[in-house]
């Protein structure tokens, strides 16, 4: 099995997902555009009209990817859509995102998800029987050791700011623990004017993002809903300790989770020697789906 007859197309693909696909595929088998990049999006659409590959992976939710899928289906191509969150977590946009997801699932030959729970949601909510569980890739990055050389305990909050993540709980925790150092890493967060906090704002470059997560002692997780878009997988791959809200304590199936209202925080060992590299298992499983 190989990827010579396989290609990934996507419009409005965020940089994190593009990095993931680059770990799965060679650059010559990928054509993606960033959000609002009209020129590159047009290029991707043109590629969908002429590529001779038989199998295509659509790895993100985007309204223009519906058009991509329609073009590919008219051309009798096999489309595999990777659905990260069958139940959207984007607040007021949830109904729109659900309809986009539903259209992409309907147009796809196969759907991939990262867990048994997500597979059951797809089969129940989207009425899609051909849904496959695949393994979330592990990490491949260059460690940067110059941002967090703190002697204090360091707690981090990661990912794009969304209402369901309850960021204010993290802010309150920062204010009530002046002897601990905190970092927020991601897009859409307000600045906290406290000496024990640093904000890394925006869409963070992969090496910096993973280096920061590898360097913190704990990752703060105050989410009211669990998203499967990557943060928890990164936490597990880096073997980080997770601080959770009391009501999420039994929801997360993760051995290194602690109630941030009760635990005494201590410095943790940072060991990158056991971090696996890349998305080889994911690649193998997708290839099996292609050849079913």
Image (tube, grey):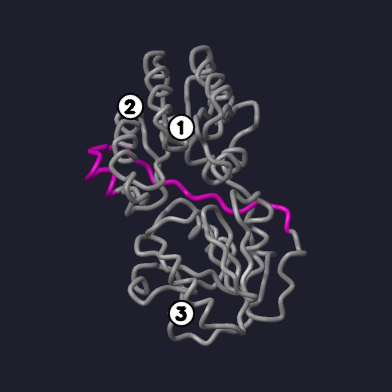
Question: Residue 29 in the image: x percent, y percent?
Answer: 60, 27
Whether 120 is drawn above or below 218: the answer is above
Label 1 neighbourhood size at 10 Å, few (<14), some (14-19), many (20+)?
many
Identify whether 153 is placed above or below 278: below
The 10 Å Cα crowd at callout 2, few under 14, some 14 to 19, many 20 or more, is many
Task: Give the number of marks.
Answer: 3
Q: Position of residue 33 (x, y in %)?
A: 56, 30
Which of disc 2 and disc 1 is earlier in sequence?
1
Q: Is residue 108 left or right of residue 41?
A: left
According to the image, label 1 marks what residue? 58
- In the picture, the disc for residue 107 is 2
User: Where does the image place residue 60, in percent across and percent down from the top left?
Assistant: 45, 37
Using the image as rendered, state which of residue 179 and residue 218 is in the foreground.
Answer: 179
Identify the residue at horizontal 40%, vertical 22% (top origin): 67
Report the predominant secondary structure element of the magenta stretch: loop
Q: Nearer the viewer, residue 127 or 60?
A: 60
Whole-number angstrom distance, CA of label 2 to CA of label 3: 43 Å
2 and 3 marks in contact (CB < 8 Å): no
**Bounds of the magenta segment:** 120-143
Disc 3 marks which residue?
260
SS for callout 3: loop
Q: Residue at x 39, y 30 (%)?
A: 63
Quadrant containing the C terminus in the rendered view: top left
Q: Quadrant of the N terminus?
A: top right
Q: Secondary structure at mark 1?
A: strand
Q: Is residue 152 above or below residue 228?
A: below
Q: Which mark sits nearer the N-terminus, 1 or 3?
A: 1
Residue at screen point 46% across, 51% down? 229
């Amino acid at each position: 099995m190989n990827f010579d007859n396989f290609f990934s197309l996507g419009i409005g693909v965020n940089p994190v997902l593009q990095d993931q696909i680059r770990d799965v595929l060679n650059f010559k088998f990928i054509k993606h555009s960033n959000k609002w990049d009209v020129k590159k999006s047009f290029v991707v659409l043109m590629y969908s009209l002429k590529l001779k590959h038989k199998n295509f992976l659509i790895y993100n939710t985007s309204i223009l990817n519906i058009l991509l899928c329609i073009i590919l289906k008219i051309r009798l191509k096999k489309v595999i859509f990777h659905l990260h969150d069958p139940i959207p977590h984007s607040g007021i946009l949830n109904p729109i995102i659900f309809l986009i997801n539903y259209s992409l699932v309907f147009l796809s030959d196969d759907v991939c998800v990262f867990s048994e729970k997500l597979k059951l949601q797809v089969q129940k909510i989207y009425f899609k029987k051909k849904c496959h569980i695949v393994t979330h890739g592990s990490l491949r990055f260059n460690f940067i050791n110059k941002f967090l050389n703190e002697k204090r305990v360091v707690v981090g909050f990661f990912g794009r700011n969304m209402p369901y993540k309850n960021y204010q709980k993290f802010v309150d925790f920062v204010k009530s623990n002046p002897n601990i150092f905190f970092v927020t890493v991601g897009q859409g967060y307000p600045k906290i004017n406290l000496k024990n906090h640093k904000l890394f704002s925006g869409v963070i470059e992969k090496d910096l993002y993973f280096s920061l997560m590898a360097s913190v002692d704990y990752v703060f997780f105050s989410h009211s809903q669990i998203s499967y878009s990557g943060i928890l997988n990164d936490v597990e791959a880096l073997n980080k300790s997770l601080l959770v809200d009391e009501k999420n304590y039994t929801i997360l199936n993760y051995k290194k989770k602690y109630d941030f209202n009760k635990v005494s925080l201590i410095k943790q060992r940072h060991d990158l020697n056991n971090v696996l590299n890349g998305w080889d298992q994911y690649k193998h499983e997708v290839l099996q789906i292609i050849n079913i």
